[in-house]
Amino acid sequence: KPHPQMIEMIIEFYEDSKDKFLLVGDSTRDKLCAKNAGIDSILVEWGFSEHQNSIHSFKELEKLLF
Protein backbone atom coordinates (compact mmCIF):
# COMPACT_ATOMS: atom_id res chain seq x y z
CA LYS A 1 0.00 0.00 0.00
CA PRO A 2 -0.62 2.59 -1.31
CA HIS A 3 -0.01 0.74 -4.58
CA PRO A 4 -3.43 -0.48 -5.81
CA GLN A 5 -2.29 -3.92 -7.05
CA MET A 6 -3.80 -5.82 -4.10
CA ILE A 7 -7.21 -4.17 -4.61
CA GLU A 8 -7.07 -4.59 -8.37
CA MET A 9 -6.41 -8.32 -7.97
CA ILE A 10 -9.43 -8.69 -5.68
CA ILE A 11 -11.67 -6.79 -8.12
CA GLU A 12 -10.40 -8.93 -10.99
CA PHE A 13 -11.00 -12.12 -8.99
CA TYR A 14 -14.65 -11.21 -8.35
CA GLU A 15 -15.14 -9.95 -11.93
CA ASP A 16 -17.33 -7.06 -10.86
CA SER A 17 -17.35 -3.30 -11.37
CA LYS A 18 -15.30 -1.05 -9.10
CA ASP A 19 -18.39 0.78 -7.86
CA LYS A 20 -19.42 -2.38 -5.96
CA PHE A 21 -16.28 -2.32 -3.78
CA LEU A 22 -15.54 -0.43 -0.59
CA LEU A 23 -12.29 -0.60 1.34
CA VAL A 24 -12.66 -0.39 5.11
CA GLY A 25 -9.30 0.65 6.50
CA ASP A 26 -7.59 1.99 9.59
CA SER A 27 -4.85 4.08 8.00
CA THR A 28 -4.36 6.87 5.52
CA ARG A 29 -2.41 4.36 3.40
CA ASP A 30 -5.58 2.28 3.13
CA LYS A 31 -7.52 5.32 1.97
CA LEU A 32 -4.82 6.20 -0.57
CA CYS A 33 -4.70 2.60 -1.81
CA ALA A 34 -8.46 2.69 -2.44
CA LYS A 35 -8.18 6.04 -4.21
CA ASN A 36 -5.37 4.70 -6.42
CA ALA A 37 -7.53 1.67 -7.26
CA GLY A 38 -10.52 3.88 -8.07
CA ILE A 39 -12.82 2.63 -5.30
CA ASP A 40 -14.47 4.22 -2.28
CA SER A 41 -13.14 3.84 1.25
CA ILE A 42 -14.13 4.34 4.88
CA LEU A 43 -11.71 4.96 7.73
CA VAL A 44 -12.34 3.30 11.08
CA GLU A 45 -11.02 4.25 14.51
CA TRP A 46 -9.92 0.80 15.59
CA GLY A 47 -6.57 -0.48 14.46
CA PHE A 48 -3.37 1.52 14.29
CA SER A 49 -4.53 5.14 14.05
CA GLU A 50 -7.10 7.73 14.97
CA HIS A 51 -8.69 9.86 12.26
CA GLN A 52 -11.10 12.73 11.96
CA ASN A 53 -14.41 11.95 10.24
CA SER A 54 -14.04 8.23 10.81
CA ILE A 55 -16.22 5.37 12.03
CA HIS A 56 -15.85 4.74 15.77
CA SER A 57 -17.51 1.34 16.20
CA PHE A 58 -18.60 -1.74 14.30
CA LYS A 59 -22.24 -0.83 15.05
CA GLU A 60 -21.74 2.58 13.42
CA LEU A 61 -20.18 0.91 10.37
CA GLU A 62 -23.02 -1.60 10.19
CA LYS A 63 -25.62 1.20 10.26
CA LEU A 64 -23.83 3.01 7.47
CA LEU A 65 -23.58 -0.05 5.23
CA PHE A 66 -26.98 -1.62 5.85
Image (cartoon, grey):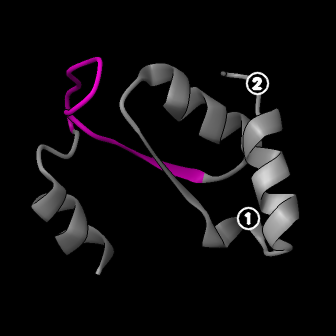
Question: From what the image shows, is residue 49 above or below residue 63?
Answer: above
Could you tell me which residue is drawn at 17 percent across and 56 percent down? 58
> Picture quarter containing residue 3?
top right
The residue under label 1 is 18
In what element is the residue under mark 1?
helix
The residues colored magenta run 40-53
Residue 39 horizontal/vertical position (percent):
64, 53
Q: Residue furthest bottom?
A: 66
The residue under label 2 is 3
Counting residues from the start of the chain, the first of labels 1 and 2 encountered is 2
In what element is the residue under mark 2?
loop
Magenta region, main secondary structure: loop
Residue 24 horizontal/vertical position (percent):
43, 48
Residue 45 horizontal/vertical position (percent):
20, 33
Q: Amino acid at mark 1?
A: Lys
Could you tell me which residue is drawn at 61 percent across and 64 percent down? 21
Q: Is residue 15 magenta?
A: no
Could you tell me which residue is drawn at 59 percent across and 28 percent down? 32
Q: Image quadrant for the C terminus?
A: bottom left
Residue 33 horizontal/vertical position (percent):
64, 31
Between the residue at mark 1 and the residue at mark 2, the CA separation in whole angstroms equals 16 Å
Q: Is residue 15 left or right of residue 22?
A: right
Q: Is residue 16 left or right of residue 31?
A: right
- 23 or 38: nearer the eye? 23
Q: Amino acid at mark 2?
A: His
> Picture quarter containing residue 18?
bottom right
Of the numbered discs in the image, which one, if any, rests on residue 4?
A: none
Q: Residues within 10 Å of mark 2 (few under 14, many from 20)?
A: some
Question: From what the image shows, is residue 8 above or below residue 48?
Answer: below
Q: Residues within 10 Å of mark 1 (few under 14, many from 20)?
A: some
Could you tell me which residue is drawn at 22 percent across and 69 percent down? 62
